[in-house]
Amino acid sequence: MSAPEEPSADSRKLDDLGRRLDSFERRAQATGTLPKKTRAEPNSALGSAFKLSTEFVAAVAVGGGMGWVLDDWLGTKPTLFLVLMAFGVAAGFFGVFRIARRMQAEDAAKAKDAPALKPDEDED
């Protein structure tokens, strides 16, 4: 049974591996055998829908939860629950509107920077 290696030996091995991988990647890109890294699209349609729905549900849940706890504590059932639930719905709509407006601005900026189609390239 061998003695465990020192952490510095592991560190040296990792550094050597990193240098070798970088060297391989540079050579592969120079010869064209490795495609250039492309930036992934930040938001998919499903991701955006999930983000918007989560924003709304979280706001409603927080408002309703706070109202329920305060109603239980103060003995004012269901007054604060309904009031804070309404505030939660309003906050949820505001949050969804804010995110949707930001996403729309990003899409407009992408469309502005995109190359225009020539009349002969237009798809019917």
Image (cartoon, rainbow, N blue to C red):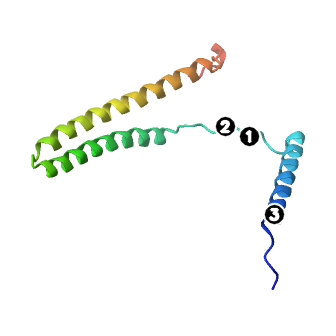
The residue depicted at 40 percent of the width and 38 percent of the height is 52
Q: Please, what is the three-letter code of the amino acid marked with disc 3? A: Ser
User: In terms of depth relative to the viewer, which is nearer, 108 or 124?
Assistant: 108
Q: Quadrant of the N terminus?
A: bottom right
Q: Is residue 3 above or below residue 89?
A: below
- Residue at mark 2: 39
Instruction: Return the x and y of residue 38 as percentages of the image width and height.
Output: 70, 38
Q: Nearer the viewer, residue 8 or 118?
A: 8
Residue 6 in picture, x, y percent from top left: 80, 69
Percent position (x, y) of residue 95? Answer: 36, 32
Binning the other alpha carbons within 10 Å of mark 2 as few (below 14), some (14 to 19) or many (20 upward) gives: few
Cα distance, mark 3 to mark 1? 32 Å
Which quarter of the rendered picture does the C terminus lie within? top right
Tell whether label 1 touches label 2 (CB within 8 Å): yes
Q: Is residue 85 left or right of residue 100?
A: left
Disc 2/disc 3 C-alpha distance (Å)? 35 Å
What is the residue that sits farthest to the top in this orientation? 119
Q: Which residue occupies the foreground of this view, 28 or 123?
A: 28
> Nearer the viewer's eye, disc 2 or disc 3?
3
Alpha carbon separation for disc pair 2 and 1: 7 Å
Which of the numbered marks, if any, corresponds to residue 8?
A: 3
Please give the residue where the numbered disc 1 appears in the rendered image: 37
**What residue is rendered at 38% in x and 43% in y?**
54
Please tell me which residue is depicted at 66% across the width and 16% down the height of the picture: 120
Helix, strand, or loop for circle 3?
helix
